[in-house]
Amino acid sequence: MDRTLRSAHIGMKFGMSHIEGAMAFGADIAAICDTDPDNLRAAGERYGIPEEKRVADYRQIMADESIDIVTVAVPDQLHAQISCDLLRAGKNVLCEKPLALKRCDLEQIVRTAARSEGKFMVGQICRFTPAFEKAKELIDGGVIGEVYFAESEYAHDYMTFVDTWRGDPDRHGVIGGGCHAVDLLRWLVGDPAEVFAYGTHLLLPTVAYDDATVAVMRFDGGAMGKVFVSTGCKRDYTMRTVIYGTKGTVICDNTSPALTLFTTDEKGITLPAQTLAVQVNNHNAAKEFAVFARAILDDTPVETDALEGAKTVAVCRAIIESSASGVPVRPDYHFD
Ligand SMILES: NC(=O)c1ccc[n+]([C@@H]2O[C@H](COP(=O)([O-])OP(=O)(O)OC[C@H]3O[C@@H](n4cnc5c(N)ncnc54)[C@H](O)[C@@H]3O)[C@@H](O)[C@H]2O)c1
């Protein structure tokens, strides 16, 4: 049965997109939280949230039994602590990607979510990007036949914001941003059984990790994949993605209003390209929030649950390990 959900939002930078998602869904904004008073005030003023609903300590949100749903958009290093505290308090938690950086934190969130009365969703927002939703629909509908190769890239210039928590050696670009491309391939094709990667470090000298990585992978079922991550690239942000099937090909992007589709005739001859219009909405937080809110109201499972978020980071970690060791690595998907 529908009722008005009461939401709270932690982290007032990217987290403001969650406020907008909650407002679009018709939730009652019960609290916003940030340790930085300037960011807290700016968000409060922007969304008309009164001062008594602005808090600096997320534990005040845990203590408020009237709050149903809490979104978490703080630095990645804090995801595990804050999400687990909220889950233990019985809250439904929507936490930003990547689920966590370290294996022990991934395990902790998966275990805590399994025991909690609250539901958990990791914000793998690319699954709500219209172009990628369309690609998924075409693949699942059999339009391009059996997928034999898929590639995605995360090319995003971090030059101006790398000297923050994003520069932490544990926050390798393959996990921080590359998790989007890895998660997309997992969603569209499946779980890679093995990965092999190379990395270079030419563009961001102040960070401890490679700023460009290319990984190839083999999926259960025989398909192949490739992920390219560049966090120092000299171009505008893109997640160009190409999916090759036995009967057609999809070429799409998070930042393009058009998806290109190739199909074949009954003899297998490639037909002229079709251009399908898609909405450009790279951060579709409104849909993400709505999907989570519906799962809470209807008491249905969440697709991008804690295990799903952990598996995506497991692939990212395998890519980093392979690029350091020079040998193929099989991602470890076991978190129980
Ligand atoms: N889905 C996406 O495409 C996407 C895009 C950007 C960021 N993100 C993710 O969102 C999260 C936040 O990123 P951002 O760009 O907003 O970072 P940011 O550093 O710009 O902002 C983080 C905010 O959290 C606040 N904060 C830090 N510690 C806190 C705490 N203990 N309690 C309350 N507030 C605290 C900071 O004061 C700051 O206002 C990260 O996990 C990031 O990976 C996701």
Image (cartoon, grey):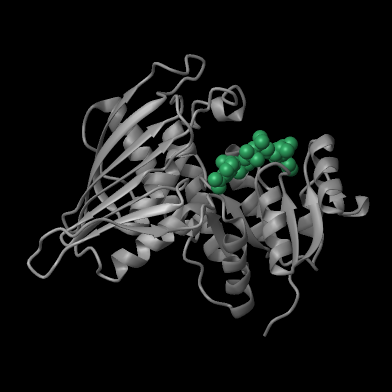
Q: At x 36% / y 67%, what residue is drawn?
A: 137
Q: Quadrant of the N terminus?
A: bottom right
Q: At x 49% / y 26%, what residue is drawn?
A: 169
Q: Do we see residue 336 in this rendering?
A: no
Quarter of the rendered structure image containing ligand 1: top right
Residue 16: image location, x then y, percent: 71, 49
Locate residue 144: give its quadrant: bottom left
Q: Is residue 152 above or below residue 307?
A: above
Q: Is residue 287 above or below residue 2?
A: above
Locate residue 215: give its quadrant: top left
Q: In the displayed image of the protein, which residue is found farthest to the bottom? A: 1
Q: In the displayed image of the protein, which residue is found farthest to the left? A: 267
Residue 334: image location, x then y, percent: 36, 54
Q: In the displayed image of the protein, which residue is found farthest to the front? A: 272
Q: Quadrant of the C terminus?
A: bottom left
Name the foreground residue: 200 vs 319.
200
Name the foreground residue: 275 vs 296.
275
Q: Is residue 58 left or right of residue 116?
A: right
Q: Is residue 276 left or right of residue 30?
A: left
Q: At x 68% / y 63%, what residue is drawn?
A: 91
Residue 173: image location, x then y, percent: 45, 32
Q: Is residue 262 above or below residue 3?
A: above
Query: How many circles with numbers are drawn on the protein?
Result: 0
Locate residue 187: give its quadrant: bottom left
Q: At x 51% / y 67%, what residue is drawn?
A: 302
Q: Is residue 305 left or right of residue 45?
A: left
Q: Is residue 334 above or below residue 24?
A: above
Q: Do we see residue 208 in this rendering?
A: yes
Residue 149: image location, x then y, percent: 21, 50
